[in-house]
Every structure is written in structure tokens, then in C-alpha cells.
């Protein structure tokens, strides 16, 4: 190392052979196929295994006074992937396909193909074909496609047989040993015997588009090839840039070159996938004990989750460091969130809910419908480009928008109680009923269409959502009976037959007339203001349940009344004011007056009662009676002052101080500003509610 002298052995290395041929060096074998140093060359270590001759060579050089320095060093060396035995490159005669003459054609045909990721096209794969080596076709093996070349034992003439018809011999099996028994007559009168080699199995794989139809010999094979070639789409791991991806293109180009095929590009689109590694970036292997069983992951998290993780973790062609924690996170953030959105709809939708046209003018509804339709445009565009990663990530972002903004900010519209006996909407309060129906119709439409959009990505979750929502369209679901509405397009109400699976539906089609990018931008700005204000609350250690007096902002476009109400509700402030003269983008008044403090206490009490309702297993429509015991006079006054607010927030019929002994469904002691308050809740019986 560092001497400027390089050792060359043209018979024992690809680079050595290439340089040796360039310098006109002889290719001489001094080691046999068993790795034993041959005699007759006066080489140190004759008769020994090549890896055991290092000391002999060193001693020989010493004895001739030619040894400059001796040291051990590490360098790359080939080993058997199965048994880890050291390997020796060994030059042998072989049959080749002269691919080096077709480099330009390979590059031209590669440019016709859409690669995902796109950088593979001119990168890893493009570089490989620009320097395409001649293809060593023959293999000294027993199993495989026989090399169809016969050589005359007398004159040495060789012929390549192209078909069974040309062979002229009826045979049931064309493989070895039967094919080796076939002898042909040479024009010189000699006998021709088949070369004993078989063909590289990658040739079989690359010839698949033609061979599967028996093209060009078999009847109707041309018609079949025309219908199926080139393939619309293939996918394999990144190592196939030297394997199947290449051999398909190589044989396609060969077939085009010899006039058998019209197009040398055998596939139109290819997704090239990176290998799945362990979480430390190491190759998985049983010997290292770092293999993750995919079936175990499917059992634990579901096949949809595992697929989604692989879609979105990184670019398709990059190696994937598989970490179970990341899979758990995807399961929670994507499918947990999506399923909870479905549960929310089922919980709050009236039992007599019927899908109809979406006519909501609510800003949240118009916004989520716009975002969904633009999502559908983007997803379809990504899928047309075979960019699954971007498509899945856009869907993931939308699920977050749906749950953590649209549904969360729409909760109050959904919470108009229904009759406990039948689940139908209660009469009266028509304005609130209309608001709830608008919210329900919008959410139904979004979830139904989203089930279709995610069906290719997450088929099981899509089917679950679709099946649950379809029940609202049917009087007697779900086996093909008349639908109350057309669930392929919930807004039409046309009464078509129920389709039993989401996978029988047409893919979700965007309605671009419903896309409002101006509204989407305004909502984005509103949410950014909310995020900054929430960060200020956190910095000042003020909980969101504590009301504040005022937020000022200076974004001119955000003066829409509905947007201001959203910001106000989300931040729990009394006033939101546009003020172009403030120094920063927002200013939050963090002074807490006594009145604001009392409101914050009331919200905390309401939150605690809501938690008790959950623990008691009550449903949202259950009316309750609440009793409390408290000794601090200021909190007694607070309870009286905030009575209506707490009852409204907790769906309570009564909220009173405990006067005697009562039996509760759940009783709990809470701590408020150091003061202990006992609270008991009781679900009102059905008859009591109906009478009330």
C-alpha cells in the first residue's frame, strides 16, 4: 500500500483481467478449481490451499532479499453468503451475450420507463446500463434451461437450435439428462453434441414476457404478447437493478434489435424498493437474531398498519430501518385516529340519520370538503405517477386535519341530545337540529369517500368504515337489499342497490368546484395563529381550560366572523381583535382576573364530571343528576354562579349541593385549588327522562 506497485493476476479477478487484457498480459492458471496451487510454475506453496500459502510467499521473498515490509491489513474479500467460506475468482471460458454493443439502445429504452423513485432511472440503474458488461450466459450446472448449442466433434462447427421444431426430435422433457442424449448430424459428416452448460436462470426471468406465451412460435402468441407487452407496472427490491429489472430490459432490447419485438422497453412503470433492515440499519439474518417476523407484526398491528408504515416511512427506494415503535406510532396516529373518527360519528349520529345532499354553509364543513376534494386530486395524481409514498402521506395529513380540527371544532354541533328510547333526534330547537344534521351529513360524506380513497392502501380499514356507514343507507343491511340512498355517491339519494364491498365501488372522484383554496389558506393562517397562542399559553403555564380576555392579531385576511369564532373557541379567549399596530404577529392578554379564574374553575369541574361519565360507562345522550359536597364558601358561591354552564357542559338535569344521603352510580373526590370537593353522579332512569 502506497508503493505505487500493483499486483495483477488476470485469471483471478475481474479488474485484474480487464487491466491484463489492456496490457496484453497472459491469462495463466496457477491454481486449480479446488483452490490448490499447481505444480510446475515454481510458485511457493505448491500443493497447498491458496489461503495457506501466505507464509510460504513471505519466506520466499525474504530468501531472495525482495521483501520490503510485512504487515497485516484489512481489505474487502468475497465470501460465500451461505457458509461464509472465502471465495476465489476464477477465469473460465463461457458463452456470452455481447451486451456492450447495445449500451446505447439500453439507455434509450430506459428513458421510456417511469421509475419510482425517479433518481434510480439515471442513477443506480442508469449508471449500470451505461457501462453494461457482456452477459456471461452459460453455467456449469445440472438443473436449468439447457444451452441450445451443438458442436461438431469432427470439424468444430457450432449451431444454435431455436425451437423444438428446429430440433426435429419429439421429446417430453427438454432438460438434462435427456437433451444430452440428442446428437445431430453435421454437414461434414461428423456428429454434433450439445454443450454441457445450462443457461443463467436470470435469462429465464428476463425472457418471461415472451416465453410465457411461447412467442414467436406458438399460435396466438403474437396476440397475447400485444395485449400484455410491455407490462404496465412491476415492482421489486433495489438489488434487482442488477437482476430482474436489468434482464427484462436486456432481453427486450435484444428482441427489438433482432426485429422480434417492436418495443425494447418491457415495462412502463417500476417501483424500486429499498431493503428492510433492523432498527440499527443492519441486514436482518437468523444467525444475528435480528429478524422480525412479518406475520407476527400483522397479528399484532394488522396488515394495514404494516403496509402503511412501509408506504410512508421513507422514499420507496431507500433502506427501511424497521422499528416496532414506529409501527406502533403509525397504528395509533393513523388507524387509531381514523377509527375514533368513525366511532365519533356512530356515537353522535341520530339513529334515523339518512345521507342526503351536503348543503352546509358552516365554514368548517366547507373547509373540510374543500380539503378532501383537493386531497383526492393529489392522491390520484400521485398514483398516476406511481408515487405511493406522497399519496399515503397526504392521506395521513388529512386524517389529522379531520380529527384534530374539523371534528374537534364541530363537537358542540354534534352534541344535541337524542331520545334515549329510540335514538332519534328530539323535537324542538330546530336551529340546533339543523346544525347537527349539517355536521353529520358532512362527516358521513367525508368518511364514506375517504374509505374509497384509502381502499388500495388499507383495504381492511376501508372495508370496516364502508360497512359501518352503509348501515345508515339500508333498512336491513348488508346483503344486497334496497338502499335508502346511493352509497356509491351519498349525496344523490338515488336509491341504487347496496354494494357489498368498498372494493366494488368506483374510486373516489374529486369535485373540483368544491375546492376553495382561498378558504384553505385562511384556515391555515388561523391554525397558525392558534398554534402560536397555545405556545404562549404553555410558556406562561396557563392551561387551556383557563379563559383569557383577549387575543390581538394583524393578519388582514382573518376578519371573517366564523374564523374569529373558531380562533376564540379554540384558544378559550373572550375576544379576538384585528390590530395592525401590534408589534408581533399576535398578542395574548395573559392577565387572569378573579372572574376569569372562576370560569376556569367551572371548566375544570365540568371536565372532571365528564371524566366521571366516561368511567361510569354513560353515553353522551344520558342525562345525569350531579350532587356535590363542599365547605369553602367561595366555591359554594362559584357552584351557584356557574350552575347553568356546568349543566350544559355535562348534560346534567340537576346540579345541587348534597343535602342528605343518596346512592350514586359513581362518587369521586376532586381537588380544586387545594380544596377537596366530593361529587356524585347518577344516571336518570329512562322513564324519568321521558317524563321530563
Image (tube, grey):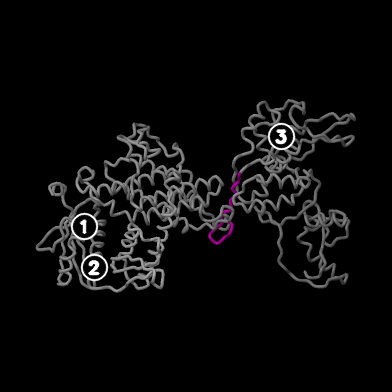
Q: Earlier in the sequence, mark 3 or mark 2?
A: 3
Foreground of the two, 551 or 50: 551
Residues in magenta, as a range: 269-283
Residue 129 placement (x, y as % from top left): 71, 49
The residue that disc 2 covers is 601
The residue that disc 3 covers is 175
**Counting other residues with Cα less than 10 Å from the Cα at mark 1, is it few (<14), some (14-19), or many (20 or more)?**
few
Quadrant housing residue 202:
top right
Distance between mark 1 and mark 2 Cα atoms: 15 Å
**Counting other residues with Cα less than 10 Å from the Cα at mark 2, is it few (<14), some (14-19), or many (20 or more)?**
many
Q: Is residue 289 visible?
A: no
Foreground of the two, 42 or 405: 405
Quadrant housing residue 196:
top right
Mark 1 residue element: helix
Quadrant housing residue 214:
top right
Is 687 placed left or right of 199 in the picture?
left
Image point (76%, 54%), residue name: 89
The residue that disc 1 covers is 648
277 drawn magenta: yes
Residue 495 placement (x, y as % from top left): 35, 33
Q: Earlier in the sequence, mark 3 or mark 1?
A: 3
Amino acid at each position: 500500500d502506497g508503493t505505487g506497485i500493483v499486483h495483477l493476476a488476470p485469471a483471478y479477478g475481474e479488474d485484474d483481467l480487464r487491466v491484463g487484457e489492456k496490457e496484453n498480459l497472459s491469462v495463466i492458471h496457477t491454481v486449480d478449481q479446488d483452490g490448490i496451487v499447481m505444480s510446475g510454475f515454481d510458485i511457493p506453496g505448491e500443493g497447498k490451499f491458496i489461503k495457506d500459502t501466505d507464509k510460504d510467499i513471505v519466506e520466499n521473498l525474504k530468501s531472495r532479499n525482495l521483501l520490503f515490509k510485512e504487515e497485516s491489513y484489512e481489505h474487502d474479500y468475497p465470501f460465500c453468503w451461505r457458509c461464509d467460506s472465502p471465495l476465489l475468482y476464477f477465469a473460465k471460458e463461457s458463452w456470452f451475450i455481447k451486451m456492450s454493443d447495445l449500451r446505447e439502445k439500453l439507455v434509450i429504452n430506459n428513458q421510456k420507463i417511469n421509475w419510482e423513485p425517479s433518481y434510480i432511472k439515471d442513477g443506480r440503474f442508469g449508471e449500470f446500463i451505461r457501462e453494461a458488461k457482456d452477459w456471461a450466459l452459460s453455467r456449469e450446472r445440472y438443473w436449468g434451461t439447457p444451452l441450445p448449442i451443438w458442436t461438431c466433434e469432427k470439424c468444430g462447427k457450432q449451431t444454435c437450435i431455436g425451437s423444438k421444431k428446429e430440433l426435429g426430435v419429439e421429446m417430453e422433457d427438454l432438460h438434462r439428462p435427456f437433451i444430452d442424449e440428442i446428437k445431430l448430424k453435421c454437414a461434414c459428416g461428423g456428429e454434433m453434441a450439445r454443450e454441457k452448460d445450462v443457461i443463467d436462470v436470470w435469462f429465464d426471468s428476463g425472457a418471461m414476457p415472451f416465453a410465457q406465451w411461447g412467442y414467436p412460435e406458438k399460435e396466438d402468441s403474437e396476440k397475447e404478447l400485444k395485449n400484455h407487452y410491455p407490462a404496465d407496472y412491476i415492482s421489486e427490491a433495489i438489488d434487482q437493478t442488477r437482476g430482474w429489472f436489468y434482464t427484462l430490459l436486456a432481453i427486450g432490447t435484444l428482441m427489438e434489435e433482432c426485429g422480434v419485438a417492436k418495443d425494447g422497453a418491457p415495462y412502463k412503470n417500476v417501483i424500486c424498493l429499498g431493503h428492510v433492515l433492523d432498527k440499527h440499519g443492519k441486514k436482518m439474518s437468523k444467525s444475528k437474531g435480528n429478524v422480525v417476523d412479518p406475520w407476527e407484526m400483522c397479528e399484532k398491528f394488522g396488515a394495514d398498519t404494516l403496509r402503511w408504515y412501509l408506504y410512508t416511512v421513507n422514499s420507496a427506494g431507500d433502506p427501511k430501518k424497521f422499528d416496532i415503535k414506529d409501527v406502533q406510532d403509525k397504528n395509533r396516529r393513523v388507524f387509531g385516529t381514523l377509527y375514533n373518527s368513525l366511532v365519533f360519528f356512530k356515537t353522535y349520529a341520530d339513529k334515523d340519520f339518512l345521507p342526503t345532499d351536503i348543503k352546509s354553509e358552516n365554514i368548517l364543513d366547507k373547509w373540510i370538503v374543500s380539503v378532501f376534494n383537493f386531497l383526492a386530486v393529489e392522491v390520484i395524481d400521485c398514483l398516476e405517477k406511481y408515487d405511493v409514498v406522497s399519496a399515503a402521506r397526504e392521506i395521513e395529513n388529512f386524517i389529522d386535519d379531520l380529527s384534530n380540527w374539523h371534528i374537534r371544532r364541530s363537537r358542540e354541533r354534534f352534541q344535541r341530545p337524542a331520545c334515549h328510547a329510540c335514538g332519534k333526534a328530539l323535537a324542538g330547537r330546530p336551529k340546533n337540529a339543523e346544525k347537527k344534521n349539517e355536521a353529520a351529513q358532512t362527516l358521513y360524506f367525508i368518511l364514506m369517500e375517504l374509505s374509497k380513497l384509502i381502499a388500495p392502501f388499507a383495504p381492511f380499514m376501508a372495508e370496516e368504515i364502508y360497512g359501518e356507514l352503509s348501515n345508515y343507507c339500508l333498512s336491513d343491511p348488508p346483503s344486497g337489499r334496497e338502499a335508502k340512498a346511493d352509497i356509491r355517491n351519498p349525496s344523490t339519494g338515488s336509491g341504487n342497490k347496496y354494494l357489498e364491498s368498498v372494493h366494488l365501488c368506483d374510486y373516489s372522484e374529486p369535485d373540483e368546484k368544491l375546492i376553495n383554496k382561498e378558504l384553505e389558506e385562511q384556515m391555515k393562517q388561523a391554525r397558525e395563529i392558534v398554534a402560536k397562542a397555545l405556545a404562549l399559553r404553555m410558556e406562561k403555564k396557563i392551561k387551556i381550560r383557563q379563559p383569557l380576555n383577549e387575543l390581538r392579531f394583524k393578519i388582514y385576511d382573518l376578519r371573517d366572523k366564523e374564523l374569529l369564532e373558531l380562533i376564540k373557541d379554540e384558544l378559550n379567549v373572550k375576544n379576538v381583535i384585528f390590530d395592525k399596530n401590534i408589534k408581533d404577529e399576535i398578542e395574548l392578554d395573559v392577565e387572569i382576573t378573579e372572574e376569569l379564574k372562576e370560569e376556569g374553575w367551572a371548566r375544570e369541574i365540568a371536565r372532571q364530571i365528564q371524566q366521571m361519565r366516561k368511567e361510569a360507562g354513560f353515553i353522551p345522550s344520558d342525562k345525569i343528576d350531579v350532587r356535590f359536597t363542599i365547605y369553602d364558601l367561595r366555591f359554594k358561591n362559584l357552584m351557584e354562579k356557574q350552575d347553568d354552564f356546568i349543566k350544559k357542559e355535562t348534560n346534567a338535569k340537576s346540579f345541587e349541593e348534597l343535602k342528605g344521603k343518596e346512592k350514586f352510580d359513581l362518587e369521586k373526590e376532586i381537588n380544586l385549588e387545594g380544596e377537596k370537593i366530593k361529587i356524585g353522579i347518577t344516571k336518570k332512569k329512562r322513564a324519568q327522562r321521558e317524563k321530563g
